[in-house]
Amino acid sequence: MLFQMMYDMNSGMFIIIAAFILGLIARSGVNSTFNRYSQVRNGMGLTGASMARSILDNYGLANIDIQQIQGRLTDHYDPRSGVLRLSSGVYGSDSVAAIGIAAHEAGHAVQHAMGYAPLKLRTALVPVANFGSRMLFPLLIGGFFFHMTNLIYVGVVLYGAALAFQLVTLPVEFNASSRAVNWLEKERGFSHSDVVGVKKVLTAAALTYVASALAAIGQMVWLLLAGRRR
């Protein structure tokens, strides 16, 4: 029985550890791939900002402002304020990496404008996912300390929102990358090597989201088994 309990508990922990290792590999891959293609100028000489502006204007989204922000790979689209923010290494750079990331973030803006369902769901999950993540460990500590299994299951339910957020993030990110690649493939000024480089940059970035989702799944498995064994 003890061996079975340890085996069950370790099943979730194994997923978490595997996801952690994958996350380290993914982050290393993102950095190395971004560094590599940051040194390669794209065929049209567009900067990240001009790439994003071209895509947004094509979809009638001239109202969306593009702002430069500090940091490395801090690029994101803010649906609440309707602003696309690009890091300094992307905003003014004409590298293959820059246009790929800028096109990806512009893809999120297009998703928002078109009412892309997974993006709407992810946005709606943000507050409850944040709350669930904050309350998880206090509930776990209380559940174990006071021997109250119900508190553990409350934590599991709340953490389920955080898990749902991680899972719905996958189609949102994959779709934005697909939109970016499709845009580059339609533009005649970009070479085949430009498209290949962008695909590599965005694929490396996608692995980080996969690792995060696996880690969340592993933690959920561990929590369920912990509650059951109480």
Image (spheres, grey):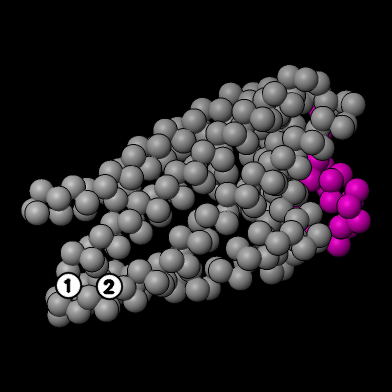
Q: Quadrant of residue 42?
A: top right
Q: Pinpoint residue 203: horizontal percent, then vertical percent.
A: 59, 34
Q: Amino acid at mark 1?
A: Phe
Q: Which residue is mark 1?
A: 144
Residue 27 is left or right of residue 227, and the answer is right
- Residues 71 and 16: in front is 16
Magenta span covers which residues? 45-67
Badge number at residue 91: none
Residue at 82% across, 42% down: 50
Tell me how many marks there are. 2
The residue at the far left in this view is 2
Q: Pinpoint residue 48: horizontal percent, then vertical percent.
A: 74, 40
- Specify the quadrant that holds the C terminus: bottom left
Q: Which residue is mark 2?
A: 152
Marks 2 and 1, the one that precedes in the sequence: 1
- Mark 2 lies on a secondary structure that is helix
- Mark 1 lies on a secondary structure that is helix
Q: Pinpoint residue 157: horizontal percent, then vertical percent.
A: 39, 72
Q: Amino acid at mark 2?
A: Ile
- Within-10-Å neighbours for mark 1: few <14, some 14–19, many 20+: some
Q: Quadrant of residue 112?
A: bottom right
